[in-house]
Amino acid sequence: MTATDPALTALAQGWSALALLHGRIEAHIERALQAEHDLSVREYSLLDVLSRQHDGEGGHLQMKQVADAVVLSQSATTRLVTRLEDRGLLERYLCPTDRRGIYTNVTPAGLRLLEEARPTNDAALREALDTAALNPELAPLVKVVESLSVPAQVGE
C-alpha cells in the first residue's frame, strides 16, 4: 500500500469521520456536564466506572484497569482521582489482602452527583447523536453506535 492507495485513503477518511463524531459528542456532553454539574466528561466517566465496582471476587479495579476504562494514562488517571478525592467524591484505601494495592471507591457524595449527572449525560449524548445523524457523512456511524447493545469490557 502506498499513501495514495484508495483503500488507505478510504480508511483514513473513515477514521476522520469517527474522530469527528467522537469529538462532537464529547464536546457536547462536556458542555452540558460542566454547566449543570461542574463535572468534566472524564470525571463523569471515572465516577461511573468506579461506581460499578463491587465487593465480590474481582470486583475492585486496579489503577491500570481504571485508566484503561477511562482511556487515560495511569498518571493522568491518578491526577484525576486526586482531584475528585479533594472534592470529596472519591476515597482511596488499602487493599485488605495486599497492603501494596490501593483501591478507590466513590463516596456517597460522589454517588449522589453521579446520579444527578446521569440524565444530563444521557440527554446530551442523545442530542449529539441526533445532530450528527443529520450529517450524511456521520449518519452511518451514528447507526452503528445506536445498534451497539453490549458495553465494552474494561481492559479490551
Image: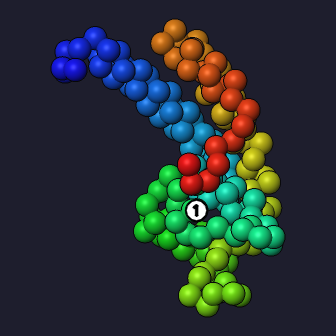
**Above or below: residue 130 compared with residue 71:** above
Q: Is residue 154 left or right of residue 80?
A: right
Q: Residue at x 69, y 41 (%)?
A: 151
Query: In front: 150, or 33?
Result: 150
Q: Residue at x 58, y 62 (%)?
A: 66
Q: Is residue 106 visible in the rendered structure shown here?
A: no
Could you tell me which secondary element the residue under label 1 belongs to? helix
Instruction: Work out which quarter of the rendered image holds the N terminus and state it.
Output: top left
Query: Whole-percent x and y of residue 60?
Result: 70, 70
Q: Residue at x 19, y 15 (%)?
A: 4
Query: In front: 23, or 37?
Result: 23
User: Crowding at label 1, few (<14), some or many (≥20) Cα neighbours within 10 Å?
Assistant: many
Q: Quadrant of residue 61?
A: bottom right
- According to the picture, the residue beneath numbered tag 1 turns out to be 66
Query: In front: 141, or 153?
Result: 153
Query: Whole-percent x and y of residue 77?
Result: 50, 65
Residue at the farthest bottom position:
99
**Above or below: residue 24 compared with residue 54:** above
**Above or below: residue 22 compared with residue 95:** above
Figure disc tally:
1
Amino acid type shown at disc 1: Val
Query: Whole-percent x and y of residue 7?
Result: 32, 14
Q: Is residue 110 left or right of residue 30?
A: right
Query: Whole-percent x and y of residue 57?
Result: 77, 70
Q: Is residue 114 visible in the rendered structure shown here?
A: yes
**Above or below: residue 76 compared with residue 118:** below
